[in-house]
């Protein structure tokens, strides 16, 4: 075989870089799609959880007149307000759980301190809230239509869908491979261009590196859809306001 | 290393351009798919919201005979017409909310002015309309079958799906990266062709730029499916006509 | 810069063609996927609409014995046959609406002429048929189980899904861009090959053009899933036969 | 223009081949995705059809005690066993319909010969079986809860989903185009390599051809998910065993 | 035709490698998407199975007060605890079935030995547990609302979805083809680089081979989502704790 000089070897590197680059872009595209799907699912499901909470509040408020007929105005109002309160606690607990934060104050506005402790001690506080929403004196239970129980089920399952997104990461094997290819590719790129551009290779590689790593970072950020940027408080606030109105 | 002349450097630029181009096309394809999915979802869900409204009107009109049996012909007709009216208000409010417009006149045709104000003051006017559709005197409530309540729930959830599309943009990180790559790529392209085509490069780059930016613009337009072009009024008009008929 | 001769310029065109080609293939692939999804959805939903009609006929026929108990054999048979008839009209009207045809004869076989006119005057004839299926004398209404009403809702919503496919085209911006790129690419291709193959370029370009335009045409045809080729009459015929049997 | 010798023309063919190759791979990828989706859907839906049959058998068996209360032990057992038998017939008929086979013996094990003939004469035998599962003497009908009727509906709709997969082929236009491109590409490939490898081109093209045609064949096989290889009998056998147990 | 020397032939091999490489990457991308979808589906469905179990436990515990009214405190508690026990057995059996393990001890903690044997003898133990959850003395049956039966159905169907993922592999034809192309491509790669890099080809090919085979292996691992790494025990443990609490 004919010996090659240094330059020809570097020139040939371009073909290796292309091969790695194709694998890298396929993985990157796969990663981004998976992360975006997570983000879409997480966001949609959490919003649905809030909307279902509001809708359930409407259904409960709509039953007010039948409660009045059974137990009097006073008792019925208390009953409905307690249900609405527990729905708000469920929304707040769901939000805090998914965002890994503990905002004691928001809960104390809604519940007495001993209840908050019971709630924090429970393994699945949202399910406990759902249980509390449905739990009431027997003579009112007959008025509880099936529709209501189904709404609770649906609402809890939407929360579970959020939990699934939260607790099922993208398989680590993919991310590990993606990063290996990314490192290899970024290591090859400068040698491909250095023979043509000499010192200009440095800014060129910075731009390319910034671009590619940026895409990877975007995927990493989008992967956890329940971050700090997510404006849940507004939704919950609107939910609260709307509930208070309907009652 | 061997020094290169100016032309060779430009020639080599073509490989940089290709690398950026591949990343650009992947991002563009990703963006377009996401935007198209939003458009498809938004359009389908909004149409379903209208269809469910019409279907709910059919169900309510189908209960007319049992209302007549309970409260007499006069009262029953009023009751049903009021429900249908609130469904129309829900459709109109949903449309105005999603299109960010305030057409006071359309609402005043359907409701007395004080009700319109209450509606505008509410945080979630569509939910308020749903509440009003179901809210009626106790002796009719017993006739309200579960089916009807479920239709209201489904209809509201379809509206919420529209709201989710409306309020969850495509993550900004992707769009920012896409535009960076687009700008870089468009900046590189002329230097690749100028050595071969001299002045003809200008029209050539205009055509290519128009094409690529056009695709990006198409995605940006499709991303918001509830725009002015969307012929909702026709749907709502048809809905109205159909409701009036059935009553 | 070094001047290039005519041939070198043409040779370089190949790189422009490749760039346009990549964009073209991405758009073509996107278009085909969207069209195929429409086709799949439209076909599945329409078939489900027919299947649900058959299933609803089964449910109604299964209630025959309770109708006989309420109103006698004669009346019950008439009642059930009238429901089945309206289901068949709904299927026929759905088919005609989606295929933009007006086959008066098929309808006159099922309904008296004045009913056909009322049906044609209605804005949403399928909803009207659904209304008619459920509309009956009050003493039978109590026997109408919820299940039946839900089947009507589901069936109507399947039809609405067809209507959504029918009335929501693929955004024009995409198709316009696709066709621009297609024209540009087809205009460039001959100049790339003419320097190598001279006269043989003509058949070569014909074959390539036939291939690419053919793919575009396949997408355009598949996009409207309710065409003439669609063997709905068979389905409806089978539906009819099956209904007659069950009654 | 400069005349080219024979070799240069062949060398240039490589670019034509690449263009055709890209179109071919896009179509092949599209075809494979569509075929795989069909396979996934068909398999899942058929398995769900079997699972729902088993579940329905459980529900029916769970109602045994209320039948005993209404009509005595003897009659109730007969009633339940007949329902289970019709479910098994539905599963068997569904399997035979989707696999285009007629195994008279399996049916005769379950039903008397005259019933088998009635079943074969029916246009939609699975629907007929569903009808038979629900059809029983009036005094038991009151015990038939809605849940049961919904299970029948769901089960039938799963079967219809299988029928949709079975009766909706991938549009022929795509397959025709795919095969045209495949033939063209395979016809070009040898001429590209023959100038470099002479006689070694023959095994090389055999390997490439085998690979590509193999992928196409895999898609064609996967497209019909209800083939002979599909181990349904096991599922049905397990279903039978499980049903017998529960009764 | 002009004879080529050895080096030119090897150089040309690069084009064959690229063709095989494109096919390989398409198949690899297809395979990874299919495997990832399986993983996502399997994980989501199994988690939903657990969540539905917990939710069902909540519903049953919520019925406690009506059972007390029918049969006294003692009996009602026993009844509810037995139901909860059977739900736990269903979760445990589902887990063991999907992970192909037999942990006798976990079951013996929940059930008496003779029941465990009956369970192991059954063909579909999860369905048997569901049957047991619903099976109770007649006077309590009237209190069993439809909602509860539907929850059992949904829970069982989620388990069936897991079973479908577990028992429907990715079609072997694809994996066979993928591995053929992988072997061919890996066999070609060294000859492409050896002329330029001589001995450095060995580490280069090791790195590339490790990368590509690693991606294939990641797909193979992700394909079976119910592996040992899957932290189900935690979920079940949490489920247990939560159930005990609510009772």
Image (cartoon, coloured by chain):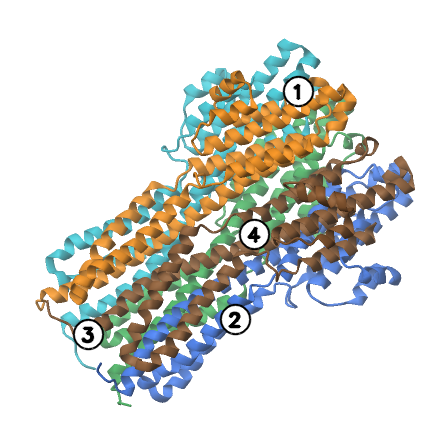
Chain colours: A orange, B brown, C blue, D green, E cyan
Are the residues flagged by discs 2 and 4 in contact, CB closer than 8 Å?
no
Rendering coords of residue B214 (x, y %): 46, 67
Query: How many discs appear?
Result: 4
- Number of other residues with Cα within 10 Å of mark 4, as a class: few under 14, some 14 to 19, many 20 or more: some
What element does badge 4 sit on?
A: loop
Are discs 4 and 3 located on one and the same chain?
no
In front here: D237 or A245? Answer: A245
User: The disc numbered 3 marks a residue on which chain?
Assistant: B
In front here: C66 or D204? Answer: C66
User: The disc numbered 1 marks a residue on which chain?
Assistant: A
Rendering coords of residue A216 (x, y %): 34, 49
Q: Nearer the viewer, mark 1 or mark 4?
A: 1
User: The disc numbered 4 marks a residue on which chain?
Assistant: D
Q: Nearer the viewer, mark 4 or mark 3?
A: 3
Q: Which mark is residue E18?
A: none
Q: Which residue is mark 2?
A: C176
Report, in whole angstroms, how far the alpha carbon at label 1 lies from the one at label 2.
Answer: 61 Å
Q: Which mark is residue A136?
A: 1
> From the viewer's perspective, is E243 left or right of C185?
right
Q: Which residue is mark 4?
A: D99
Are the residues flagged by discs 4 and 3 in contact, CB closer than 8 Å?
no
Tell me the residue at 75%/38% (across/down): B134
Tell me the residue at 80%/62% (across/down): C120
Q: Which residue is mark 3?
A: B6
Rendering coords of residue B206 (x, y %): 40, 74
Viewport quadrant of the N terminus of chain D:
bottom left
Are discs 2 and 3 located on one and the same chain?
no
What element does badge 3 sit on?
A: helix
Report, in whole angstroms, how far the alpha carbon at label 4 lies from the one at label 3.
Answer: 69 Å
């Amino acid at each position: 075989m004919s010996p090659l000089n240094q330059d020809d070897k570097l020139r040939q590197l371009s073909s290796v870089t292309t091969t790695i680059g194709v694998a890298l872009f396929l993985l990157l595209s796969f990663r981004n799609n998976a992360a975006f799907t997570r983000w879409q699912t997480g966001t949609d499901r959490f919003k649905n959880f809030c909307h279902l909470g509001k809708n359930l509040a409407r259904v409960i408020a709509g039953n007010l007149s039948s409660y009045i007929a059974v137990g009097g105005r006073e008792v019925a109002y208390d009953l409905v307000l307690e249900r609405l309160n527990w729905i708000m606690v469920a929304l707040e607990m769901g939000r805090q759980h998914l965002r890994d934060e503990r905002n004691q104050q928001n809960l104390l506005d809604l519940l007495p301190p001993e209840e908050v402790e019971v709630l924090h001690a429970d393994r699945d506080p949202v399910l406990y809230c759902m249980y509390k929403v449905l739990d009431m004196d027997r003579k009112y239970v007959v008025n509880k239509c099936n529709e209501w129980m189904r709404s609770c089920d649906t609402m809890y399952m939407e929360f579970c869908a959020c939990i699934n997104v939260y607790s099922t990461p993208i398989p680590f094997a993919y991310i590990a491979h993606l990063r290996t290819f990314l490192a290899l590719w970024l290591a090859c790129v400068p040698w491909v261009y250095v023979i043509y551009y000499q010192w200009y290779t440095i800014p060129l590689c910075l731009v390319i590196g910034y671009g590619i790593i940026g895409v990877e970072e975007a995927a990493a950020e989008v992967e956890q859809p329940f971050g700090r940027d997510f404006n849940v408080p507004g939704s919950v606030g609107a939910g609260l306001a709307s509930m208070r109105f309907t009652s």
